[in-house]
Image (cartoon, rainbow, N blue to C red):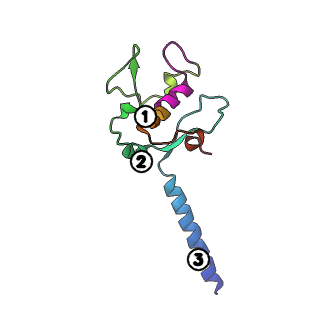
Amino acid sequence: MNKSVVYMIAFVIIFVFVLVSVHSQEDMERVDNSVFKNPERPSALFRHDEHNENADIENCSECHHLYEDGQMIEDGSSEDQHCSDCHALKASDSIPALRKAFHMNCKGCHLEQKQGPVTCGECHKK
């Protein structure tokens, strides 16, 4: 086989692999865990738009809730804030700690809906 044909085939294979890898990561997002000094696990990964489409979530406040005086504000959305703006590393009064808030919101919904990841390694992927 001609060397140039072998190089061309190798180039095409590498190009396709890179293209597929880049596209598959296109809408990948990480949950911001920068507030944790020494996180035990990598931040949770998920495809935001794909998740909402599969879960039939149209109202942002279903995940991005907003509370005032201990009461959830109907249709209030915190999507322009970080979770750590309201949730500290340690619980205070009726506000759960950040880690617990993440788990209650995400894992709690997955358990309630009986679908979605619920074990550590399913969300916290390296």
Give the spatial CA distance, label 2 vs label 3.
33 Å
Whether residue 51 is in magenta: the answer is no
Name the N-terminal-most of marks 2 and 1: 2
Callout 2: few (<14), some (14-19), or many (20+) C-alpha neighbours within 10 Å? few
Residue 9, label in figure? 3
Residue 105 x, y percent position in the rendering: 46, 30
- The residue located at (52%, 38%) in the rendering is 118
Q: Residue furthest right?
A: 38
- Tell us which disc is closer to us: 2 or 3: 2
The residue carrying pointer 1 sits among few (fewer than 14), some (14 to 19) or many (20 or more) residues within 10 Å by Cα, namely few
Q: Which residues are magenta?
A: 91-105
Is there a contact, CB below 8 Å, between mark 2 and mark 3? no
* Labelled disc at residue 50: 2
Task: Say whether marks 2 and 1 touch (CB < 8 Å).
Answer: no
What SS does tag 1 mark? helix
Residue picked out by circle 1: 112
User: Is residue 104 magenta-colored?
Assistant: yes
Q: Quick one: SS at disc 2? A: helix
**Which residue type does callout 1 highlight?**
Glu
**Left or right relative to 23: residue 121:** right
- The residue shown at (56%, 62%) is 18
Q: Nearer the viewer, residue 118 or 76?
A: 118
Mark 3: secondary structure: helix
- Of the image marks 2 and 3, the number of the one nearer the N terminus: 3
Distance, label 3 to label 1, CA atoms, is: 49 Å
The quadrant of the image that shows the C terminus is: top right
Q: Position of residue 81 (x, y in %)?
A: 45, 28
Under mark 3, the amino acid is Ile
First in sequence: mark 3 or mark 1? 3
Q: Which of the two residues, 46 or 17, is positioned nearer the viewer here?
A: 46
Q: Disc 2 versus disc 1: distance between alpha carbons?
A: 19 Å
Q: Residues within 10 Å of mark 3 (few under 14, many from 20)?
A: few
